[in-house]
């Protein structure tokens, strides 16, 4: 599944590469009524390639809303596995078979990670690399996560994880959604999450949807969730200590 907005210039290459990597997979494009005609182009693909499907959205746009709606629709169809991947070709579809293997070996969620051994980023400035790496470390610390790349959107989920309601219960907008999903999965404490290395390549066509506003919102929410977690943990430890006196 790939949420899209104004990705017409990338969609043909994207669909071709995904089809090559996983020839039997069903491909869902969740499009936010792109003004550039991305949805219409996907419809043309769907007419000639049955396993390509368009989820056309209207009204409120955004990565989080598109992801929640798309994942809910796909999971409700009974799929055993759902992979989320960006359409801008920053994620390499050839990694997807390795993700499926990790799920088959027992993981419930597989995160394509830039920050585990073997992972890397190309075409980013040093400042952007440091901002992302330290932002992810801060997120992991505040939310009590063992995941190194909390903001990666390249993931594989077992269908039952989506059907558990964890993803649907998220409330954030923008890319904070990605960290919130992991945080809520951790709170359930019954899902196994692993990371595999990916080489992230910044888009060469089209415009990034990331902005300073989105980054600030994400850090604000992570701080809020983290403080609530730490305060709850401290309160619980205090109660346990008082009970042992």
Image (cartoon, helix red, strand yellow):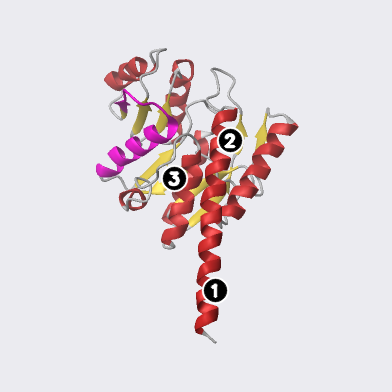
Seen at 33% across and 15% down, the residue is 40
- Write down the region rendered in magenta: 53-77
SS at mark 3 in the image: strand
**What is the C-alpha distance between the residues marked 3 and 2?**
27 Å
**What is the C-alpha distance between the residues marked 2 and 1?**
33 Å
**Mark 2 or mark 1, whichever is nearer to me:** 1
**Mark 1 or mark 3, whichever is nearer to me:** 1
Residue 216 magenta-highlighted? no
Seen at 42% across and 55% down, the residue is 108
Visible residue check, residue 19: no
Q: Which of the labelled discs sits on residue 173, or is there none?
A: none
Q: Which residue is label 1 attached to?
A: 238
Direction from residue 75 to residue 152 in the image, left or right? right
Of labels 3 and 2, earlier in sequence is: 3
Direction from residue 5 to residue 197 in the image, left or right? right
Q: In this view, does 240 lie above or below 130?
A: below
Q: In which quarter of the image is the N terminus?
A: top left
Q: Which residue lies furthest to the bottom in this view?
A: 245
Depth check, front residue: 7 or 131: 131
Q: Which residue is label 2 attached to?
A: 216
Seen at 33% across and 34% down, the residue is 26
SS at mark 1 in the image: helix
Residue 153 image offset from top left, x and y in percent:
50, 38
Q: Which residue is label 3 attached to?
A: 156
Q: Residues within 10 Å of mark 2 (few under 14, many from 20)?
A: few
Of labels 1 and 3, earlier in sequence is: 3
């Amino acid at each position: 599944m790939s949420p899209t907005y104004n990705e017409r210039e990338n969609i043909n290459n994207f669909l071709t590469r995904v089809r090559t990597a996983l020839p039997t997979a069903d491909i869902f494009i969740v499009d936010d009524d792109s003004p550039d005609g991305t949805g219409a182009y996907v419809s043309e693909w769907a007419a000639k390639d049955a396993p390509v499907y368009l989820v056309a959205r209207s009204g409120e746009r955004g990565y989080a809303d598109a992801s929640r709606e798309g994942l809910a629709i796909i999971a409700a169809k009974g799929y055993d596995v759902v992979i989320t991947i960006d359409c801008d070709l920053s994620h390499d579809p050839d990694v997807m078979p390795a993700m499926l293997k990790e799920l088959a070996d027992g993981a419930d969620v597989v995160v394509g990670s830039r920050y585990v051994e073997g992972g890397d980023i190309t075409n980013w400035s040093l400042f952007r690399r440091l901002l992302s790496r330290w932002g992810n470390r801060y997120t992991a610390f505040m939310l009590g996560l063992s995941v190194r790349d909390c903001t990666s959107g390249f993931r594989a989920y077992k269908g039952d994880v989506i059907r558990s309601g964890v993803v649907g219960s998220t409330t954030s907008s923008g890319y904070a959604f990605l960290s919130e999903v992991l945080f809520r999965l951790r709170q359930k404490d019954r899902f196994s999450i692993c990371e595999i290395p990916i080489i992230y390549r910044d888009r060469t066509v089209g415009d990034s949807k990331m902005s300073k506003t989105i980054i600030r919102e994400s850090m604000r929410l992570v701080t809020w969730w983290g403080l609530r977690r730490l305060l709850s943990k401290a309160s619980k430890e205090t109660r346990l200590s008082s009970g042992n006196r």
